[in-house]
Amino acid sequence: MHNSFIARNPSVLWFLLALGLFTIGVTILSEAGMSVISTSFVKTLGKTLCLCLIAIAMDVVWGYCGILSLGHFAFFGIGGYAIGMWLMYARTEGIVLDSLSTQVIPPTPFEIEAAIGNQIFGVVGSSDFPVLWAFADSLFLQLLMVVLVPGLLALVFGWLAFRSRVTGVYLSILTQAMTLALALYLFQNDSGLRGNNGLSGLQNIPGFESTPQSTISLAFFYASALALGLGYVLFAWVVSGKMGSVIKAIRDDEARVRFLGYHVESYKLFVFTLTAIVAGIAGALYYPQAGIINPAEIAPIASIYLAVWVAIGGRGRLYGAVIGAAFVSLLSSWFTGGGAPAIDLGFYTILWTDWWLVLLGFSFVVVTLFFPKGIGGLFDYLVRKPS
């Protein structure tokens, strides 16, 4: 029993308990209960849980395996685009069928498809469906794409990079270059994903048009909480036991692990691919709550923010990544949403919507210099501090 999974990972039960209590609390305080918190804030909390999930994935690949990936938010965005394509197609199809139902002569399938294409791609001067949208009419296939596309992209990229033994800052630059290339491609109108306009109206779930947003937001909140809980357990299992020991050894001294006979590239590829798949799932849950996705979401700066969240929370600790992502995400919503009061200095007024990123950068520098173990490290100190 001493070597059981729970014994090796006592934080798992505490985390699941805290997550369960948090979920119950939000349900009671939402518009479905006491109406203390608004539907928009429930969506903010749901999105925060998704960001916590990708932060855990980033912590495993960076904090445990030592791979500073500056491209994991690209996988997050790909998951969002994959589910967003079905949402846009199904919703537009319903609108088109309603508008054509009054015609005396029933429309042909070709006319219906042309009308749907014109509605979706008219904003970029086209009406033809790109090859990328071949499975957009199937929810099941698009859900598969949420997993397969990030997974295959990470598998191919990781295989090419790791077999060449690219490490350190060079690997970080490569991941950032991959993300930049993907973002620049998506910004083009002929990319097949509406260019800079992105995909919008994702909060309108096909088949649930009459369902209030308060109910839909709560359902997505539950789904996000479930995904976060399962993701935490999954990654706690990955970083524990023999596998976890090898992964952490690769982070600390890759050459020695290779000398001992372990196939380092296989471990790194497994971690890189698995975390990319989980990032895609997190994105698929996030963007229906955000309502819109565009190429700016995949820009390299987003992946840099992700690394900052993990550093502030404390890398090498799964709960540290959750703390960092939740802390920064909720603070960001407060500062950029007008919740933080402006500070009048007489000669200058500090508007936090303009200065929030400066404050975030300053916090990152302070944590790096004075609290290298992050907020999670402070928590460890308080818990283990001798009486």
Image: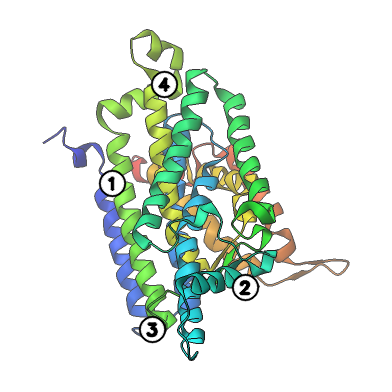
Residue placed at 85% from the left, 66% from the top? 348
Q: Which residue is mark 4?
A: 265
Name the colouring of the figure.
rainbow
**Amino acid of disc 4:** Glu
Q: Which mark is residue 130?
A: none
Residue placed at 45% from the left, 60% from the top? 136
Judged from the image, the secondary structure of the residue bearing numbered disc 1 is: helix
In this view, the mark in front (1 or 4): 4
First in residue order: circle 1 vs circle 3 = 3
Mark 2 → mark 4, Cα distance in angstroms:
47 Å
First in residue order: circle 3 vs circle 2 = 3
First in residue order: circle 3 vs circle 4 = 3
When the figure is inspected, residue 350 is found, relative to residue 363, above or below; the finding is: below
Where residue 26 sits: x, y (%)? 37, 73
Q: Which mark is residue 211?
A: 3
First in residue order: circle 1 vs circle 2 = 1
Residue 74 visible in this rendered orientation of the protein? yes
Q: Which mark is residue 339?
A: 2
When the figure is inspected, residue 349 is found, relative to residue 154, above or below; the finding is: below
Residue 376 visible in this rendered orientation of the protein? no
**Amino acid of disc 2:** Gly
In this view, the mark in front (2 or 4): 4
Question: Would you call the spot at circle 1 few (<14 residues within 10 Å), some (14-19), or many (20 or more)?
Answer: many
Judged from the image, the secondary structure of the residue bearing numbered disc 3 is: loop
Question: Would you call the spot at circle 3 few (<14 residues within 10 Å), some (14-19), or many (20 or more)?
Answer: few
Label 2 with label 4: CB-CB less than 8 Å: no
